[in-house]
Amino acid sequence: MPQEIEVWYLLPALRKELARVFIKDYDMKQKEVADILGITEAAVSQYLSSKRAVELKFPKEELQQIKIAADKIVKNKSGAMEQLSSLSKKFMGNSKTICDLHKKYDSSIPHKCAICATN
């Protein structure tokens, strides 16, 4: 199901990339990142050490969109969930990356599938 792909793979991968950007580009501490994303410091640590969210790799264009969202979050920390939701909807609706991952974990998906794009 597309919703399972979103919850199990996409959202953790988005959190991982946002955490990486916050720490690398904005010099934030893990505690601050955890507070912004609504996760534990341990989760941030696991994202950064690639112990979590390793199944999904974003292409360069999507990484750029994540960086733009990170900048918006830094300017308005209370808007983090809105940005995360927006990224999730965007990537679920038209991302070859998501489709490829979905097909990898579900062999019954037809070659010319558009399930995620229509949900």
Image (cartoon, rainbow, N blue to C red):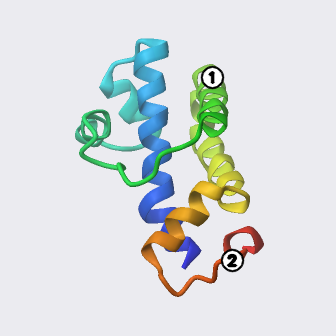
Q: Quadrant of the N terminus?
A: bottom right
The extreme right residue here reads 118
- Residue extending farthest to the front is 111
- What percent of the width, then of the height, locates residue 102? 52, 70
Q: Secondary structure under badge 2? A: loop
- What x and y, as percent, mark residue 101? 50, 63
Name above or below for residue 96 compared with residue 40.
Answer: below
Residue at 28%, 40% in the rendered image: 50
Task: Answer above or below: position of 82 versus 88.
Answer: above
Q: CA distance from mark 1 to mark 2?
A: 33 Å
Along the line of sight, which residue is nearer the eye, 115 or 59? 59
Kindly identify the amino acid type of the residue bearing the numbered disc 2. Answer: Cys
- Of 75 and 15, which appears nearest the observer? 15
The C terminus lies in quadrant: bottom right
**Quadrant hosting residue 45:** top left
Q: Count numbered badges in the picture.
A: 2
> In the rendered image, which residue does mark 1 sit on?
71
**1 vs 2, front mark:** 2
Residue 119's tag is none
Measured as percent of width and height from the top left, residue 104 is found at 46, 70
Mark 2 lies on residue: 113
Above-or-below relation of 85 to 71 = below
Give above or below for 83 relative to 88: above
Q: Earlier in the sequence, mark 1 or mark 2?
A: 1
Residue placed at 32% from the left, 40% from the top?
Answer: 47
Q: Secondary structure at mark 1?
A: helix
Of residues 55 and 68, the one nearer the viewer is 55
